[in-house]
Amino acid sequence: MAIAESLKNQRILLAGCGNLGGAIATRLLQSGAEVFGLRRRTDQLPQGITPVAADLTQPATLKNTLPPRLDQVIYCLTPSDYTEQGYHAAYVTALENLLVELKGQTPSRLFFVSSTGVYGQDDNGWVDERSPTQPSGFSGQQVLLGEQTALASSVAATVVRFSGIYGPSRQGFLQAVINGRLKPPAHSHYSNRIHEQDAARAIVHLSTMAAASETLQSCYLASDCEPARLDQVVQWIRQHTDCVAPADDARDGGRAGSKLCSNRRLLKTGFQFRYPDFRAGYRELTDQRKGA
């Protein structure tokens, strides 16, 4: 089967079908897959996605609800609250519950949507899939536990570590700059990001490879092609759209480590970024503001 047609008739479950999961599901549907979206409120699913109403943190709601004969599962959950307990529930407990209900099925691949927050590096150096994962915060620690749970399961698993996702539905950073609520110091820490369209496209690309029985690695780092210092990104935005002068109490951007995320392994699969750097992504967003 040609790789361009490999998703046709694939039965794929999106376990967690919010903003990112919904974008992935829509692209899979357009590629000919039969797509099932699992979430608590299925009325918010994109059109054409078969609803699966369940709460992954509540095992009783999963009983006899999963569709049979699944070819792939894409696990794309986010915490309902941003505490250590919330992260553990979303990335570990809920995944364990799903894996119990999947017993007896033989999907060819489980994709686990992860984060570059599993890295604790703060030395301005490059990190890739082989770099040590020693997160200092509870969020990264719980996501890493989720990765380990996925990789230890009976289903062949691939972890995809996304850097900071931004785009039309994720404009918090852009709005903070525009409203003068962000003023990082000169030569601030390095930041890494990926446009939400490229994030969804990367998962669909890897899913297509899986459907075509292409060789997949157990982990991919998904970040655009140009890590950038935070103050450089803020300065560029301020030069390309109207912004309020930074307030006296504007945040400096905080610290989530300082590292350069390498996407070389993902690029070697043939994936091409639509937004290869922050300028391409934020230029489109700022142009839309001018035309609004």
Image (spheres, rainbow, N blue to C red):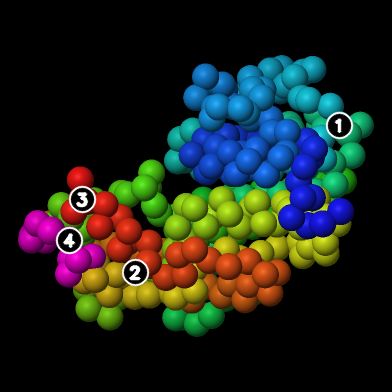
Q: Is residue 145 visible?
A: no
Q: Which of marks 2 and 1 is nearer the N terminus?
A: 1
Residue drawn where x is 60% and y is 35% of the image: 16
Judge by depth and name the residue closer to the eye, 38 or 28: 28
Q: How crowded is mark 1: few (under 14 residues within 10 Å), some or many (20 or more)?
A: some
Measured along the vertical axis of the image, is residue 156 above or below residue 272? above
Q: Which of marks 2 and 3 is nearer the N terminus?
A: 2
Residue drawn where x is 57% and y is 34% of the image: 17
Instruction: Find numbered disc 4 in the image and state the secondary structure of the residue it sits on.
Output: loop
Amino acid tagged 3:
Gly
Instruction: Find numbered disc 1 in the image and state the secondary structure of the residue it sits on.
Output: loop
Q: Dominant secondary structure of the magenta stretch?
A: loop
**276 sits to left or right of 231:** right
Q: Nearer the viewer, mark 3 or mark 1?
A: 3
Q: Residues within 10 Å of mark 3 (few under 14, many from 20)?
A: few
Q: Indicate the quadrant where residue 212 lies.
A: bottom right
Q: How far apart are marks 4 and 1 (CA)?
A: 50 Å
Residue 291: assigned label: 3
Residue 69: assigned label: 1
Q: Earlier in the sequence, mark 4 or mark 3?
A: 4
Q: Distance between the residues labelled 2 and 1?
A: 43 Å
| Dot 2 and dot 1 residues touching (CB under 8 Å) | no
- Mark 4 — residue? 241
Number of numbered discs overlaid on the protein picture = 4
Residue 41, image x and y in percent? 53, 21
What segment carries the magenta color?
237-248
